[in-house]
Image (cartoon, rainbow, N blue to C red):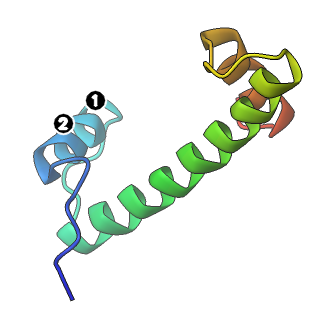
Amino acid sequence: MAKRKNIFSINYFERVFKEAGAERISRRAAEFLERHIEEKVKEILIEAQKIAKNSRRSTIMMEDVKIAIKKLKLE
């Protein structure tokens, strides 16, 4: 099985955690968080695509994403 390509680097999470006041994040924690974020992004995009389709568009617009986030109660 091919190794999964990370979307975010460990350095990205370290920077974000430091901005949030944390000292460090383990690689396993960063990988878990990354998978969780990726799943949430997929949920948002699926919902945004439905919204765009209902508006007879094939392109997802920023407003579709905003509405999807609100509808999924992720804001």
Quadrant of the drawing holding the N terminus: bottom left
Q: Residue 57: x percent and y percent?
A: 73, 16
Label 1: element kind: helix
Q: Residue 50: x percent and y percent?
A: 80, 34
The residue singled out by tag 1 in the image is 19
> Of tags 1 and 2, which is closer to the observer?
2
**In which image quadrant can residue 5 be found?**
bottom left
Determine whether 21 is above or below 23 in the image: above
Tell whether label 2 touches label 1 (CB within 8 Å): yes
Residue drawn at the location 75% of the way across and 38% of the way down: 47
Q: Few, some or many C-alpha atoms within 10 Å of disc 2 (few <14, some 14-19, many ≥20)?
A: some
Residue drawn at the location 29% of the way across and 46% of the way down: 22
Residue drawn at the location 62% of the way across and 20% of the way down: 60
| Near-viewer residue (38 or 49) | 49
Residue type at tag 1:
Glu
Q: Residue 67: x percent and y percent?
A: 78, 21
Residue type at tag 2:
Arg
Disc number placed over residue 74 in the picture, else none: none
| Near-viewer residue (29 or 34) | 34
**In which image quadrant can residue 31 be found?**
bottom left
Q: Few, some or many C-alpha atoms within 10 Å of disc 1 (few <14, some 14-19, many ≥20)?
A: few
Farthest left residue in view: 11
Q: Residue 37: x percent and y percent?
A: 48, 51
Residue drawn at the location 28% of the way across and 36% of the way down: 16
The residue singled out by tag 2 in the image is 15
